[in-house]
Amino acid sequence: MSLLILICLPFLVAGAILVGLLLMTRIMPGDPSKAKTAAPVVQPVPARGPEYMALAGERGKTYRRGFIVLLALAALTMLEFAVAIYTGSLVPLFIIALGKAALILQYFMHFSSIWSEEAH
C-alpha cells in the first residue's frame, strides 16, 4: 500500500500544480497577446534628501501596519498553541491557519494588488 502511495503521489502533486497553473491563467486579467514588450519604467526610491523626508509619513504608516500584522500573527500563533494543547481538535487549528495565511497573503505578499491595474 505504501509503495503505491509513493508511486502515485508525485503524479498527483504534478497534476495539482498543472491544474493550478491552468486556473491562474484563466482568472488573471488581461490578454496575453496584447502584452507590452517593454519593461515598465520604475522610479527609484530616494535614499536621502527632501524626497526621502517627504515619504517619511508613508513609511511610518507602512511600518506601523506591518508591526500590527506581526502582533496579530503572534497572537494567532499563541491561540493556535493553546487550542492544540487544550482541545486537540484539528478544525479550529485549520481555521486559525487560514486566518494567518490570509493575513500573510494580504499584507506581506500584496495578493489583492494582482487584480488591480495600479502599480504596486
Image: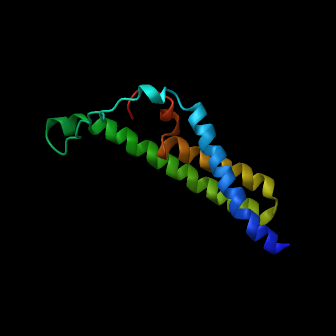
Q: Quadrant of the N terminus?
A: bottom right
Give the side of residue 92 with respect to residue 60, left or right: right
Residue 29 is situated, as x and y percent measured from the top left of the image, at: 52, 28
Give the side of residue 26 with respect to residue 70, left or right: right
Q: Nearer the viewer, residue 21 or 69?
A: 21
Give the residue drawn at x 45%, y 46%: 66
Q: Is residue 43 shown above or below 21? A: above
Give the residue drawn at x 24%, y 35%: 43
Write down the quadrant of residue 50 in the picture. top left
In this view, the residue farthest toward the right is: 1
Give the residue drawn at x 72%, y 57%: 12
Residue 117 in view (yes/no) = no
Residue 61 is situated, as x and y percent measured from the top left of the image, at: 38, 38
Give the side of residue 30 with respect to residue 101, left or right: left
Q: Quadrant of the C terminus?
A: top left
Q: Is residue 35 shown above or below 64? A: above
Give the residue drawn at x 49%, y 43%: 107
Residue 89 is situated, as x and y percent measured from the top left of the image, at: 82, 59
Residue 12 in view (yes/no) = yes
